[in-house]
Amino acid sequence: MGLPTLEFTDSFLDSPDFRERITCHEIELERTNKFIKELIKDGNMLIAAFRNLSVAVQKFSQSLQEFQFECIGDAETDDEVNIAQSFKEFSQLLNMVEEERRRLIQNADDVLITPLEKFRKEQIGAAKDGKKKFDKETEKYYSTLERHLSLSSRKKEAYLQEADTQIDKERQLFYDASLEYVFKIQEVQEKKKFEFVEPLLAFLQGLFTFYHEGYELAHEFEPYKQQLQFNLQNTRNNFVSTKQEVEKLMKRIRSADQDYKPPGQWTMEGFLYVQEKRPLGCTWTRHYCTYDKGSNTFTMSNTDTKSNGVVLNQPEIFKLKSCIRRKTDSIDKRFCFDIEVVERHGVMTLQALSESNRRLWLEAMDGKEPVRNLTWFILCSLIFGKNFRINTMGLYRIGGVNSKVQKLMTTSGTILSRLSFLFCHIYIIVSLESDDQNYRVCAVHALVHKLPERNKEMLELLIQHLVTVSTQSQLNLMTVSNLGVIFGPTLMRSQEETVAAMMNIKFQNIVVEILIENFNKVACFFVFLKVFFFFIQRLFLYIRSLFCHSTKIEFCCYIFLFVLGLLPEPTGLKMPLLVSPLHSKGAQKHNSLRDHSTQLIPSSSSETAHAFVDFYCLYRDAKAMYSCEAEHSHELSFPQGAHFTNVYASVEPGWLQATYEGRTGLIPENYVVFL
C-alpha cells in the first residue's frame, strides 16, 4: 500500500485523519533521509576502495613493466622473446583498464555523492523546514483560537470585531503554512523518483562502462593470449626435452671416470699442489692452475680459506717450456710431475689430485704420458618398415631398447656427422643474425645445399618423412613443434655436452621446424638448381664445340660466365679480373684449369651451386630509415626512404655495399632495414 494522498482542502478541516496521513509522509521522508545518508557513506567507502585498488594495480603493473625476463644462453627463441615481452603487454593492458577506473573515480563524486547530498539537504531539508513552520503556526493558531472563544459576549462590539479580525489573520497564516507543507511533502515524494535515482543511474552507467571497457580489452587481448599460450606450450616442450638431456648429462658426469675433463676455455684447469722449498724442508700449497696450449701459458693462483669462503690471490703467469712425469721412486709423493718455465730456473714440482688427473695435465702440456684424442660422433638415422604406422599416437616419443640402440649407433658410425656439423652453423645463424623469418629460411636453404650429395639425400628423405608425419598430427599428436623438440637434439647435438649447450636445444628445434614447414620450397629450389646448372654446363660445352679452334672466343665466353658468378676464377691468368661481389665475399679460388689458362674446364655444378645460393641469399633490397651525407667518395649519399638494390655485406665492419640511383657504394648498416 502506497502513501495516502493529501488534499489541500484537508488543510482547512485539519482532521485527525489528515494529521495521521501527514505523519505517514513524514515517516517516509525520514526513512529516505537516513537511507541517503547511508548510501553516501557507502559510496564514499566504495570510491576509496576503488582508489586503493587502482593504486595497488598500478604498482603491480609497474613491477611487471620493470621486470627483466632473462633466459639462459646467448640468444632467445621467438617463443622466449614473446614470453619476456608478455610482462610488458600485461602491464600495458592493466594500465588501460586503470585509466578507465581513474575516470570512474574522478567522476564518482560529481555524479553520485554531490547530487545525493544536494537532494537530501535542499529537498528533504526544505520539507523539514516546512514542518517546523506548520507546527509553529498550528500551535499559534489554536492558542489564539482558544483565547478568542473565551471572550465574553458582553465585550464592546469594537473589541469583539478587532478580536475577530485577529483570529481570521491567524487562521489564514495557519492555512498557508498547512497548504505549503502539504505541497512540499508531496513534491519531495515525487522528486525522489528521479532526482534521487538519476545519480545512482549515472554512477552505475560509469561503473558498467568501466566493466565493458575491460571486456573489450579482454576481447582484443584474446589473439595475443592464444599466441602466448602457444609460446608457453613450445617452451614447456623445450623444457621437457632440455631437462631430459641435462639429466642425462648430469648422470654421465656423475658416473664419469676421474680422467674426465669438462669443456672450458682452458686446455686444462684445476687444483694442483705446488712444492715450495724451505730451509728446513718443503711445503705443499694448493693452487688453482690453468693452462692454455695455444699460448703455452701456465697460470696458478694461491687460495686462502677464510670464513666467507675461498679467496683467490693475484695469479702468477708463466711461459711453459717442458713437462715431465715425475718418477715414483724419485719423490715420496704420488701423482707428481715437473714443469720448466721461462720465468724461473730449475723445475717446479706439482702434485695432481689422482693418477688420471696427472695424465690429463701431461696430455695437455705435451708431457710423456700418451695423448688420447677423443672424438665425438653424432648419429642421426631413420629406419622405415613396410608396416610403419604414422598415425600412432605419441610417435617417436617412445624410447627403444637400449641394447639395440647402442648396436645401431655402433654399426651406423658417422653417417650424418657432416649434417650435424652443418646444423650447428645453421642454428647460430637462425638465432643470432636475423629476426627476419624469410632470411632464416633462405639461410637454411643455402647451408643445406652445401651438404655432400649423400647427406643431402638422407636429409631430404628424413624431412619428407617428418612432413608426412606432421600432416597426421591430429591422430598422432606429432605437430611440427613436437617433431622439432624430438629431432632437433638428435640432428644437432653439440660436440661439447654442457648445460650451456643444452640451453641451445631450443634453436636446434627451430631449425627442424623451418625445414619441415618449408620442405616444398627447399625441394623445389634443389630441383631448380640442378636443372639450371645442368643447362649452364651444357651451354658452355656447346660454346666450346662451336669455337674449339678459337681460344680467344672461348676465353671471352668463360670470362662472361665468370663475371655473372656462374664459373670460378681462372687461376692461370697473368692479370687480375673484374671480381664479382659474389667472389669478393670470400669464395675460394678454384683450380679449374688443366695446363694452360686457355684450356678452360668449368667447375662442378655443386661448387657453382654453392656460389649461386650464397648470391641468392645475400643480395637483397633495403630501405633507408634515416638520411645520410657521404663523407668519402666510396660512400653513398641518400635521403630518408631511399630504396637500395643489390645490398650485401661489405668487408668494412658496420657497412653494407648497395646500389642507389645507378651508383654503387657503402651505406651504414644501422641506417637501413631489409625489405
Image (cartoon, grey):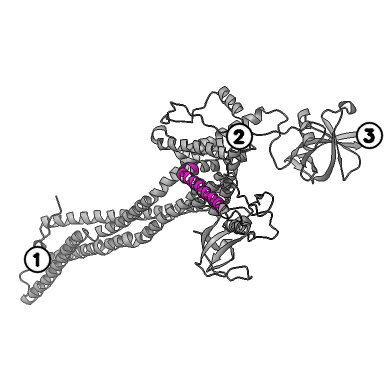
In the image, 387 versus 367, the foreground residue is: 387
Answer left or right for 368 relative to 656: right
Residue at (51% x, 37% y) in the render: 485
Label 2 or label 3, whichever lies nearer to me, is 2
Q: Label 3 belongs to which residue? A: 280
Classify mark 1: helix, strand or loop: helix
Residue span colored magenta: 515-542
Q: Is residue 69 visible?
A: no
Quote the CA–CA distance across marks 1 and 2: 127 Å
Using a 10 Å C-alpha cutoff, classify the residue at mark 1 as few (fewer than 14 neighbours), some (14 to 19) or many (20 or more). few
Residue at (65% x, 29% y) in the render: 254
Q: Name the residue type under label 3.
A: Leu
CB atoms at circles 2 and 3 under 8 Å apart? no
Which residue is at the far bottom?
A: 158
Q: Label 2 belongs to which residue? A: 378
In the image, 568 versus 673, the foreground residue is: 568
Answer left or right for 35 relative to 67: left
* Residue 523 in magenta stretch: yes
